[in-house]
Amino acid sequence: MPSKKAATKKSNKPKKNAAIDTLLTENRLFKPAAAFTKQANAKKEIYARAKKNPVKFWESMASELVWKKKWSKGLKWKAPDAEWFVGGKLNVTESCLDRHIKEGRKNKAALIWEGEPGDKRTLTYFDLYRQVNKFANVLKKLGVKKGDRVALYLPMIPELMIACLACARIGAVHSVVFGGFSPESLRDRINDLKAKILVTADGGYRRGQIIPLKHDADVAIAECPSIEHVVIVKRGDFLLRIKEGRDHWYHRLMQEADNYCAPTYMDSEDLLFILYTSGTTGKPKGIMHSCGGYLTGVYATTKLVFDLKEDDLFWCTADIGWVTGHSYLVYGPTACGATQVMFEGAPDWPDKDRLWQIVEDYGVNIFYTAPTAIRAFMKWGESWPGQHDLTSLRLLGTVGEPINPEAWIWYHKVIGGKKCPIVDTWWQTETGNILITPLPGITATKPGSATHTFPGVEAKILDDDGNEVKEGGGYLALTKPWPAMLKGIWGDRKRFIDAYWSKWPGIYFPGDGAKIDKGKYFWILGRVDDVINTAGHRLSTMEVESALVEHPSVVEAAVVGIPHDLKGEALAAFVTLGGGKEFNDKTISILKDFVARKIGAIAKPDRIINAPELPKTRSGKIMRRLLRDIAIGKLLGDTTTLADPDVLSKIKKEYEED
Ligand code: WTA
């Protein structure tokens, strides 16, 4: 283990005129173990091969999938429109299901599922194949045709995955709406999609409470004229109202359905799904993904980033309501023929060791989760994972937010037993698959850095004028097309161009700030909307937060800019203290000094506010925008994507008392 002394330290003065100044330097380096390298799916030559001819590289990955008709051209590119595998025809479920049935995985477990109350189900590849075929026939019978939109509003049960794949089987476009979203969110998405069918459940479980999904769906679709039928999966014995003619029980329809449904062959560029992303700002956008390119992207990254082997048990903890669940649960692992865990519940129910219990019970090998979860595990303490045998783990991953080095090290030591490589994977709903990431067995990792681009991907750091920043901070930019890239925003071409393609000509702007170091490692600094301009310096909130979290009393921090007469903006830091630590004036001055010492006086927060919890989206991203509203005393903006609305009023009170 590299020494703590070599950890984060002050860098030189921030560079003037940089798009974003950089403050922290992290020097610890973790080289892959020789034994891991020897068995890894990705070999070093892959980078040079992909660089030489990226399209050819992607074509070689695509050719590992099942195609009805081979493409005639790898890529046709006229920014912002990319056509991948032009002229190719496929049905993605043939790669995810049919071929496994034929190639010796018929009785292999595809899904090992555990429900929140502790109920368990295992579905083999044949089970999954059979159910998908049957449900595809159900949808057909209800009048669903190629290109029709089907909304899915379900808990994390196998039927959610079955429904996604059944839509794909018949060329219908699924749109999953996270089961924790409100009736209004569901209504707005269904109306934007003009979905014909809604698949839901009688209810779901969340920390012992019942979520009345069908009831909420009824409220939503009272204002959704496009919905013709509702299919209800029976999850429990939950009360509900059935509207004759419109509402149907899933199990009844399945009983009558034929066993086999011939796949509908799709053009490589035909739509596979639409997924809404609101991120932390603005009105949700319906992100469109297509068949051939998307499947190629998620297949290649699942195989190479997670180093999946035939006998591995893979577990991505994300809900299918998010893109991570689409790419690294529904499509990527099944395209690889993997066995995976699917879990319905929460990590702290009935106790804070639920995930570690699952790792131990089933012998999970590869575990993929979010920094927000890792910070929660840290807050709960080592004793929870400590009660379990986690030695089956061989690879760990993170996604969703920048991971601060302290959390990375904790994950490495406490969960990974210092022996698992960590893949910090940067990507977005829009990018479809992982784009910046280590390749285990090849990349030496640095805690907090997503390291390098995946083979075949090209990213740069640019300034406002589009000049490349060779070392330092700026905007992250994707300078070449990649197969799983978004095809647009459903019904809003202008927003698609404005949001992603108008900062520099022909270059994709993801909206994130990042820096690149001497060794050509990328460090994601978070959303550029969150950058603070103080006394002429543009600081990433993430770096100040990272410094705060290094203090032993702080488990989580969110930093925002507040107007300041002299500096333009000053920093306000909302902090969550750990282990029952008391928040008082002394804490405030200790933390201010700590930041000043760690990264310099310019980053010293003017205010430190106690926040027993931070406002987050349902997928765990901190909503700094709302904290900014609190800090400047503004009425709160759109809070519909907030996981727990009560958190805000608690913080507001602390802020006003401060
Ligand atoms: C952030 C999730 C730093 C980033 C797959 C991005 C990350 C947004 C990382 C997309 C990472 C995701 N390091 N930041 N490894 N991964 N992000 O659409 O700001 O839910 O733009 O997709 O999350 O979030 P989304």
Image (tube, rainbow, N blue to C red):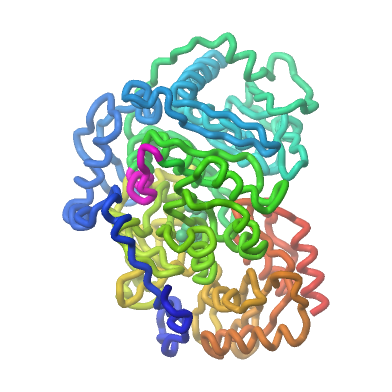
User: Residue placed at 25% from the left, 45% from the top?
Assistant: 58
> In the rendered view, would you say 45 is above or below 635?
above
Q: Quadrant of the C terminus?
A: bottom right
Q: Quadrant of the N terminus?
A: bottom left
What is the span of residues highlighted in magenta in the rendered image? Answer: 300-311
Residue 528 in view here: no
Q: Position of residue 294 (x, y in %)?
A: 37, 41
Instruction: Depth check: give the residue in front, 434 or 473.
Output: 434
> In the rendered view, would you say 395 is above or below 70?
below
User: Residue placed at 61% from the left, 47% from the top?
Assistant: 357
Left or right: residue 118 versus residue 506 is: right
Q: Position of residue 487 (x, y in %)?
A: 40, 43
Rendering quarter of residue 379: bottom right
Q: Position of residue 582 (x, y in %)?
A: 77, 77
Left or right: residue 282 versus residue 494 is: right
Q: Is residue 301 magenta?
A: yes
Residue 515 in view here: yes
